[in-house]
Image: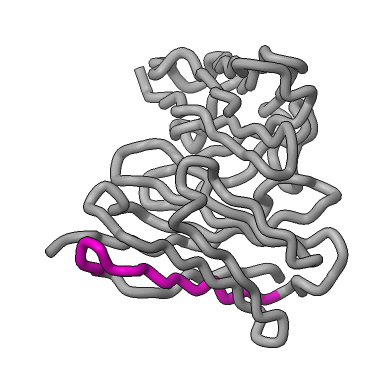
Amino acid sequence: EIVLTQSPATLSLSPGERATLSCRASQSVSSYLAWYQQKPGQAPRLLIYDASNRATGIPARFSGSGSGTDFTLTISSLEPEDFAVYYCQQRSNWATWTFGQGTKVEIK
Amino acid sequence: QVTLRESGPALVKPTQTLTLTCTFSGFSLSTSGMCVSWIRQPPGKALEWLALIDWDDDKYYSTSLKTRLTISKDTSKNQVVLTMTNMDPVDTATYYCARIQSTIGFLDYWGQGTLVTVSS
C-alpha cells in the first residue's frame, strides 16, 4: 500500500503570508494526486486534482505541483478562510486510494 | 446540482453489522465514468478511504478492511449502500460518501457525513 506523508503537521502563519505544504509518496503515483481542504464540522472540499489542476471554483491563489513521489500545495497569500486542515490523496490505480495524515494551517 | 446524503444508525453495538445508505441526486450511476466512494474519519483523525463502486458495478475495497466491507448500488433509487460487519469501538467515525467522475478522477462532491458511534 502506498503511504502518503505530509509535512509539516502544523503550519503557523499570518494572513497574507505564503503557505507551502508537502506530500511525499512511498512510491510513484505519477500525477494521480489530489489536495482537499477541510474546515471544522465540514466535509472535505476538492482543491487540486492530477497534481496541478484546480477544481471548479477554486481561487487562483491555490496551486499544486509535483509528480512521482513529491508534491506541493502552495497558497500564495493566505486569506482568513484558508485556515483549515489540508489532505493529499492518491489513486495510483483505481483499486487503492490513500490519504495523507493532514497538515493544519493555523493562524499565528 | 449534485448532492449526496448519508443515512444510517447513529449508534451500533460491538459485533453488530453497520448498514449505511448514500442517496444522491444530480447524476446517475448508470452513466459511464461515474463512481461513488465511501470514506471515514474518526474524531480528530485523518480521512480513510473505504470502498468504491463504479457505473459498471466494479467494486474496490480498502486492503485492510476488505473482509468486512460490502458495497452495492441501486441505480433506480440513486443509492449506494455500504455494509461493515463486526463493528468495534475503533470504527467510531464520521462516514462520508462522495462522487467521482472519470474526467476528474477524484472525489469532487461529498455528503455532509454521518457520525456512527460504536458502543455497548
Task: Kindly identify the residue that appears in the image at 43 percent across and 43 percent down.
Answer: A39
Q: Is residue B35 left or right of residue A80?
A: right
Q: Position of residue B103 (x, y in %)?
A: 85, 49
Which quadrant: the C terminus of chain A?
A: top left
Residue A54's place in the image compared with B2, above or below, is above
Is B34 or A93 nearer to us in this picture?
A: A93
Query: Is residue B97 among the parts visible in the rendering?
Result: yes
Query: Is residue B109 among the parts visible in the rendering?
Result: no
Is B8 or B16 nearer to us in this picture?
A: B16
Is A19 or B39 nearer to us in this picture?
A: B39
Task: Kindly identify the residue that appears in the image at 43 percent across and 57 percent down.
Answer: B95
- Tell whether position B18 is magenta: yes
Q: As drawn, which residue projects farthest toward the front?
A: B67
Residue A24 sits in which quadrant? top right
Q: Position of residue B7 (x, y in %)?
A: 43, 74
Residue B2's place in the image compared with A10, above or below, is below
Task: Kindly identify the residue that appears in the image at 65 percent across and 49 percent down.
Answer: B107
Q: Position of residue A2 (x, y in %)?
A: 60, 25
Characterize the magenta stretch by its predominant secondary structure: strand
Task: Kindly identify the residue that appears in the image at 68 percent across and 68 percent down.
Answer: B2
Which quadrant: the N terminus of chain A?
A: top right
Residue B35's place in the image compared with A80, above or below, is below
Q: Which residues are magenta?
A: B11-25
